[in-house]
Amino acid sequence: MTGNIFSKTTIDYGSIVNKDAQYVMQTYTRQPIALDSGSGSVVFDTNGKEYVDCVAGVAVNNVGHCHPRVVEAIKQQAERLIHVSNLYYTGIQANLAEQLVSLSNMDRVFFCNSGTEAIEAAMKLARITTKKTDFVAADNSFHGRTMGALSVTHKEMYRTPFEPLVRDVTFVPYNNAESITDAITGNTAAVILEPIQGEGGINIPSGDYLKAVREVCDDTDTLLIFDEVQTGFGRTGKWFCKEHFDVVPDIMTMAKALGGGFPMGAIAAKDDITFGKSEHGSTFGGSPLACAASLGAIEAIREEKLVERSKDMGAYFKARLGNLRRDDLVEVRGRGLMIGVELNTKCTDIVDYALEHGVLLNCTSDSVIRIAPPLVITKEQIDMVVDVIEQA
Ligand SMILES: *Cc1c(COP(=O)(O)O)cnc(C)c1O
């Protein structure tokens, strides 16, 4: 191998699609573009066409694409140490743990590499802590694709082909605390909920729901797990979504925006809820490079006040979308820059039209356009996106 990797990856769209079709398992329904570079809230395809990105790698690129703080952190760390395993301490992992504990108001963290792994860790931790086995999860939940996480994910289409999964998971309607009271048994280890449902269609619970669930869990000695994989790191206008509802979970999961675009996951837990020696582990979890990227991203969120910005830009975006002149508009809902536009038609045509007109959008649960741009998006970019959705 000679030369740099970019001379080999910058190939035309048609050849990329052909190679993908031949060499990559065809699990994804991809949009008909190949992305090549990005900066802030925009990305460029291999033809040099520019897009305002309202997907952000599925709520990952909160600080924007290639944020200088993240790029610099990765560069510096890459020249120093990339990976060492968890057989050894590193200063950078200890520092990130301290930061995450402080930001999340929890007590200890465990590092892994993705959202689904964070869910696996949370489920194992709940079982080993309580010595109970069962879980209660919500209708329309999404927690990931590995066997444990899939067991608490609601969608039949994802689950059924892979059964038997972890048994003894009871699904209850979201935003209904009484149904949780009924579902909890003497063998329920934990209730697992997204504080706002993402993949399920940007479903926001009423103000007292999570508080009521917390009470039920306390009364029955059941742990409460919040899946903040999608809602974390400023996405909803708070560092973590739980702050909107003033509820403290026993365990929370993080991933997506945690690494500033670099793959990373973690759980954080309260008090004495913790793994003991050898009870869990990960080769890559909390690698120096991942921790550097994450520290860079956290610094960027602080410096640019992106949590506040998410709140303000989210309010602006929602107000503009609320006045959308579309006959098929049902509802606009969201917190911060996690916004759902529900239509009474399928939204795939709008996604296609937007792509043609320079906007990346994505739909969840068929009829909800999910808008989750980088938190650095500008008012001008928001105006442009709203115009495109209106014309679509
Ligand atoms: C994306 C997501 C996951 C899974 O994360 P992966 O990194 O794709 O494994 C889990 N929970 C929620 C709420 C998510 O949005």
Image (cartoon, rainbow, N blue to C red):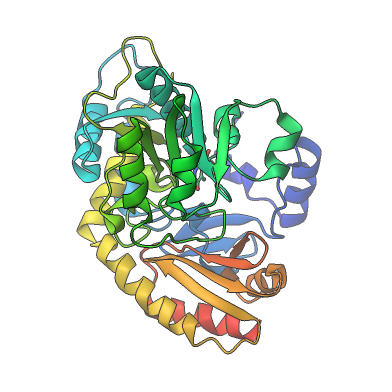
In the picture, residue 363 is in which quadrant? Answer: bottom right
Residue 323 in sight here: yes
Viewport quadrant of the N terminus:
top right
* Residue 321 or residue 31, whichever sits in front: 321
In the picture, residue 327 is in which quadrant? Answer: bottom right
Q: Going by the image, does 327 lie left or right of 23? A: left
Image position of 368 with respect to 161: above or below: below
Q: Going by the image, does 171 lie left or right of 91? A: right
| Picture coordinates of residue 116, whole percent (x, y) | 51, 35
User: How many discs mark residues in the rendered view?
Assistant: 0
Image position of 211 with respect to 337: above or below: above
Q: Going by the image, does 235 lie left or right of 384? A: left
Give the residue at x 58% y 90%: 325
| Picture coordinates of residue 19, whole percent (x, y) | 76, 42
Residue 251 in sight here: no
| Picture coordinates of residue 54, whole percent (x, y) | 51, 65
Viewport quadrant of the C terminus:
bottom right
Image position of 274 with respect to 52: above or below: above
* Residue 89 or residue 363, whichever sits in front: 363
Give the residue at x 33% y 30%: 221
* Residue 160 or residue 74, whichever sits in front: 160
| Picture coordinates of residue 242, whole percent (x, y) | 31, 51
